Amino acid sequence: DIQMTQSPSSLSASVGDRVTITCRASQGIGSYFAWFQQKPGKAPKRLIYGASNLQTGVPSRFSGSGSGTEFTLTISSLQPEDFATYYCLQHYSYPRTFGQGTKLETK
Amino acid sequence: QVQLVQSGAEVKEPGASVKVSCKASGYTFTGHYMHWVRQAPGQGLEWMGWIEPNSGGTNYAQKFQGRITMTRDTSISTGYLELSRLTSDDTAVYYCETSPKTEDYWGQGTLVTVSS
């Protein structure tokens, strides 16, 4: 199975901050990669697909980059509604595997 | 608009089975895989498998082999996840998910509690 190592596991930041979350795959996965946001009690919401493609309706302050084994999610200027948990996902091979999550909290 | 509506919460005893449904609307049900993902309380996301609704073909995570069954009823655009021999470790919210074209849709989740 492909292991997805996400860092950091938690992050304290303030509104307006630039934030970066990283995900590393245990082997190359091309761009078969996505980022999700999850708020308490809600289903995950996909933000980025194909490593760098912004999902329709997602604010442009979110961006994704990377390919192969290293991927990043950047939020250029944090907004109050962005405090949530973020997960990465590889769908290059089965089983699909998620990162362990990054909880983004207010400082 | 695309919607995935799941069945309600379940409480099961250890050793029992549970069957969760996911009714799809707003897209061609047989045209897109349906995945199932679960999330234990306070934990991360875990992929369980997929079903191809047109053929009924399935692919399950090895972890669940032997006690997981995904089925579908194309006449009512509904997918099903059945998990048997439940233990307390199966207490989780279970989600269905599909990705027609470049969009991504999730059900609202079904809480399954395993407790004696």
Image (tube, helix red, strand yellow):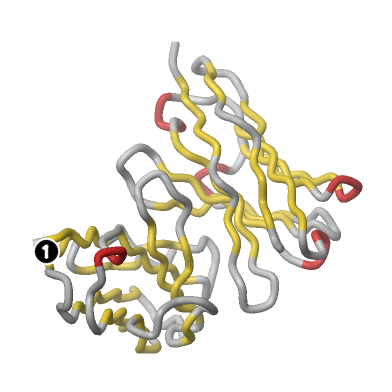
Foreground of the two, B98 or B83? B98
Pinpoint residue B8: horizontal percent, then vertical percent.
Answer: 61, 31
The residue that mark 1 highlights is A12
B45 left or right, relative to B96: left
Pinpoint residue A63: horizontal percent, then vertical percent.
Answer: 36, 85
Pinpoint residue A66: horizontal percent, then vertical percent.
Answer: 35, 89
Foreground of the two, B69 or A14? A14
**Is residue B94 placed above or below A31 in the rendered structure?**
above
Q: Residue at x 55, y 28 (%)?
A: B9
B73 left or right, relative to A95: right
SS type, badge 1: strand
**Is residue B20 placed above or below B31 in the rendered structure?**
above
Outermost residue toward the top in this view: B116
B71 left or right, relative to A19: right
The three-letter code of the residue at mark 1 reads Ser
Foreground of the two, A29 or B27? B27
Q: Residue at x 59, y 19 (%)?
A: B16
The chain that hosts pointer 1 is A
Tell me the quadrant of the picture where the N terminus of chain A can be found: bottom left
Q: Residue at x 17, y 71 (%)?
A: A15
Question: Splitting the image into 4 quarters, where does residue A107 fall?
Answer: bottom left
* Mark 1: few/some/many CA within 10 Å (<14, 14-19, 20+): few
**Is residue B83 placed above or below A79 in the rendered structure?**
above
Foreground of the two, B111 or B38? B111
Pinpoint residue A86: horizontal percent, then vertical percent.
Answer: 32, 64
Question: Splitting the image into 4 quarters, where does residue A23 fall?
Answer: bottom left
